[in-house]
């Protein structure tokens, strides 16, 4: 149990470090920073790893100075919502409700971007949403990797030497997060992973809110809160409905 608890706590720390390092870059990262943890997985992976690689690559291509940092982090809240939507406990009425709210919130954000009232590109936001869906698809069919090729981590060195220490930290944080999640997944406490799928995106976005160095637009914060609350309420209602009646 100690190893599982340590892995969970370390994953929380890595998310905070990764988000702060990402923030230092002002939302811009070289694609290599996201490629390193993916290359670390590829030798042992199957189709799921390649889907994950495509999803992360698409996400990396949207990272530029125009796309709000907070929006790039907030979009990951959709990950646990997808777990709720496709849960075995799903109720068609609740699914329609949550999907309608998510579409409304995301469409509102993209409309603001299209009208120039919010920084960034509506197209980039759409691509980010697609990338999160692809990552979720990959994780849903994921099989723990028993051994990894450690040589891609050597690529962190040129990033660090080249003055891109923030990018190196992001690459190491993502790699470490994957290790922690796989460690929990192999343990008898793998049932904690759904809880972590909620907490990790929340911790990431909350890091931006708490830190005085970053500014989160009100529209993005409201959208994030609505999606998060609707997801939590829906997940809770599904659990209540799934409980056996005496």
Image: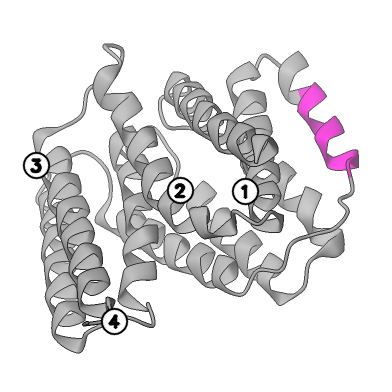
Q: Are marks 2 and 1 in contact (CB under 8 Å)?
A: yes
Give whichever of discs 4 and 1 has the lower sequence position.
4
The secondary structure making up most of the magenta span is: helix
Which secondary structure lies at badge 2? helix
What span is in magenta? Answer: 150-158
Quarter that holds the C terminus: bottom left
Query: From the viewer's perspective, is residue 34 above or below residue 95?
Result: above
Q: Which residue occupies 59% across, 69% down?
A: 138
Label 2 to label 4, Cα distance in Å?
20 Å
Q: Which residue occupies 39% across, 35% down?
A: 204
Which residue is the site of mark 2? 196
The x and y percentages for residue 154 are 86, 31
Label 2 to label 3, Cα distance in Å?
34 Å
Please give left or right for residue 77 compared with residue 41 in the image: left
The x and y percentages for residue 29 are 54, 34
Tell me which corner region of the image, top left, top right, bottom left or bottom right, holds residue 6: top right
Label 4 to label 3, Cα distance in Å?
36 Å
Which secondary structure lies at badge 4? loop
Q: Residues within 10 Å of mark 4 (few under 14, many from 20)?
A: some
Give whichever of discs 3 and 1 has the lower sequence position.
3
Q: Residues within 10 Å of mark 3 (few under 14, many from 20)?
A: few
Which residue is the site of mark 3? 117
Query: From the viewer's perspective, is residue 178 above or below residue 89?
Result: above
Label 3 to label 1, Cα distance in Å?
38 Å
Which residue is the site of mark 1? 181
Please give left or right for residue 92 compared with residue 25 in the image: left
Q: Is residue 118 magenta?
A: no
Q: Residues within 10 Å of mark 2 (few under 14, many from 20)?
A: some
Q: Are marks 2 and 3 in contact (CB under 8 Å)?
A: no
Please give left or right for residue 5 compared with residue 172 in the image: left
């Amino acid at each position: 149990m100690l190893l599982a608890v340590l892995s969970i706590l370390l994953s929380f720390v890595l998310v905070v470090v990764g988000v702060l390092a990402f923030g230092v870059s002002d939302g811009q990262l070289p694609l290599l920073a996201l490629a390193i943890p993916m290359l670390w997985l590829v030798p042992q992976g199957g189709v799921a790893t390649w889907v994950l690689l495509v999803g992360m690559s698409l996400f990396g291509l949207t990272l530029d100075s125009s796309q709000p940092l907070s929006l790039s982090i907030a979009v990951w809240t959709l990950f646990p919502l997808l777990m709720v939507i496709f849960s075995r406990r799903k109720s068609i009425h609740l699914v329609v409700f949550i999907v309608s709210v998510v579409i409304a919130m995301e469409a509102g954000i993209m409309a603001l971007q299209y009208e120039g009232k919010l920084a960034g590109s509506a197209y980039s936001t759409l691509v980010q949403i697609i990338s999160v869906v692809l990552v979720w698809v990959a994780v849903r069919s994921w099989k723990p990797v028993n051994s990894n090729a450690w040589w891609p981590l050597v690529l962190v060195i040129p990033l660090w030497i080249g003055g891109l220490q923030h990018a190196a930290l992001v690459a190491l944080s993502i790699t470490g997060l994957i290790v922690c999640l796989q460690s929990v997944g192999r343990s008898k406490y793998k049932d904690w992973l759904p809880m972590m799928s909620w907490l990790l995106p929340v911790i990431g976005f909350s890091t931006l809110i708490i830190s005085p160095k970053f500014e989160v637009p009100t529209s993005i914060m409201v959208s994030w809160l609505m999606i998060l609350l609707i997801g939590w309420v829906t997940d809770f209602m599904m659990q209540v409905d799934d409980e056996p009646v005496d």
